[in-house]
């Protein structure tokens, strides 16, 4: 009986920390700066990536650098990284190389939800950064590279090693929702569908069927918008 009880506790503990859930109309809140709070995302893909698209929505009043999406491998801690070095800059890293997209400084201090998509394809190296449905002038890097599938994927912290090396000054504080990833470059029409919350196919990461684990102080709550 004692053994059964212990096994049940272990099972409940595992189920509690490892979930696969439909998070439609839910947001992950990172309530405070730390070098611990994070959400680990898992994918099932096995093939090297020769292109990808990552989309998410973020809402924050941070006025310093922060990480939005950190995909580290044993080869590169910045194998895929969406990073904001400043409030008007968006950086996309692939295998340690980086391109940075600049927008006008927002003169309105009110924080706003931002819908951000980044894509890359190996054949041309072209990186696209879509901000609230608009593509910024395209740049490129790492033509011909392919991305290792075994990855540690983290929201809330920036990895400087595989699954670790977090810096409180690059942590995300605020809300993140609608995180998706595909192993292809989405077309403008598909990106418009993502912006209007329509379903596409072949997700690597799917917010509506998310395999995730919360570590530290991060909280899932209903969104405050429709
Ligand atoms: C974070 O930033 C603060 C303020 O700039 C600084 O004092 C502190 O040393 C930084 N912490 C780390 C771990 O870099
Ligand atoms: Ca890093």
Image (spheres, helix red, strand yellow):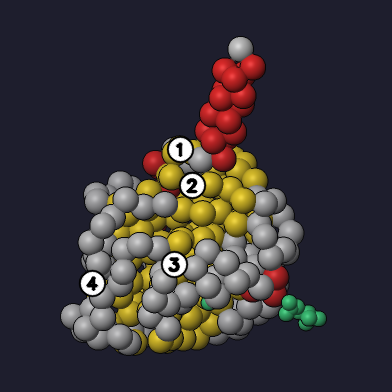
Q: Are marks 4 and 2 in contact (CB under 8 Å)?
A: no
Measured along the vertical axis of the image, is residue 187 above or below residue 140? above
Return the disc, 4 or 3, that comes first in the chain's sequence.
Answer: 4
Mark 1 to mark 2 CA distance (whole Å): 8 Å
Return the disc, 3 or 2, that comes first in the chain's sequence.
Answer: 3
Return the disc, 1 or 4, that comes first in the chain's sequence.
Answer: 1
Residue 212 is labelled as 2
Mark 4 to mark 3 CA distance (whole Å): 15 Å
- Relative to 165, 91 lies left or right: left
For the view shown, which residue lies furthest in the left direction?
A: 123
Residue receiving disc 1: 21
Return the disc, 1 or 2, that comes first in the chain's sequence.
Answer: 1
Mark 3 to mark 2 CA distance (whole Å): 14 Å
Q: Are marks 4 and 3 in contact (CB under 8 Å)?
A: no
Measured along the vertical axis of the image, is residue 92 above or below residue 4? below
Mark 1 to mark 4 CA distance (whole Å): 28 Å
User: Considering the numbered disc 1 on the image, is that residue within a helix, a strand or a loop?
Assistant: strand
- Seen at 26% across and 62% down, the residue is 183
Report the quarter where the N terminus lies.
top right
Q: Position of residue 196 (x, y in %)?
A: 38, 52
From the Cβ of disc 3, is ligand 2 less than 8 Å away? no
Few, some or many C-alpha atoms within 10 Å of disc 2 (few <14, some 14-19, many ≥20)?
many
Measured along the vertical axis of the image, is residue 43 above or below residue 26? below
């Amino acid at each position: 009986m004692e053994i059964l009880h212990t096994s049940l506790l272990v099972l409940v503990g595992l189920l509690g920390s490892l979930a696969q859930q439909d998070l439609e109309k839910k947001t992950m809140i990172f309530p405070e700066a730390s070098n611990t709070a994070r959400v680990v995302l898992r994918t099932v893909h096995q093939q090297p990536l020769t292109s990808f698209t990552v989309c998410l929505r973020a809402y924050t009043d941070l006025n310093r650098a922060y990480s939005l999406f950190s995909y580290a491998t044993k080869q590169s801690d910045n194998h895929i990284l969406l990073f904001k070095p400043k409030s008007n800059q968006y950086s996309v890293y692939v295998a340690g190389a980086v391109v940075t997209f600049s927008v006008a400084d927002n003169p309105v201090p009110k924080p706003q939800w931002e819908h951000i998509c980044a894509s890359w394809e190996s054949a041309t190296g072209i990186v696209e950064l879509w901000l609230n449905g608009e593509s910024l002038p395209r740049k490129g890097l790492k033509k011909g590279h392919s991305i290792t599938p075994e990855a540690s994927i983290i929201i809330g912290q920036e990895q400087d090693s595989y699954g670790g090396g977090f810096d409180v000054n690059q942590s995300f504080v605020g809300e993140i929702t609608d995180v998706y990833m595909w192993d292809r470059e989405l077309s403008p029409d598909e990106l418009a569908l993502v912006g209007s919350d329509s379903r596409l196919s072949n997700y690597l990461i799917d917010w509506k069927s998310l395999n995730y684990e919360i570590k530290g102080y991060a909280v899932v709550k209903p969104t405050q918008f429709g």
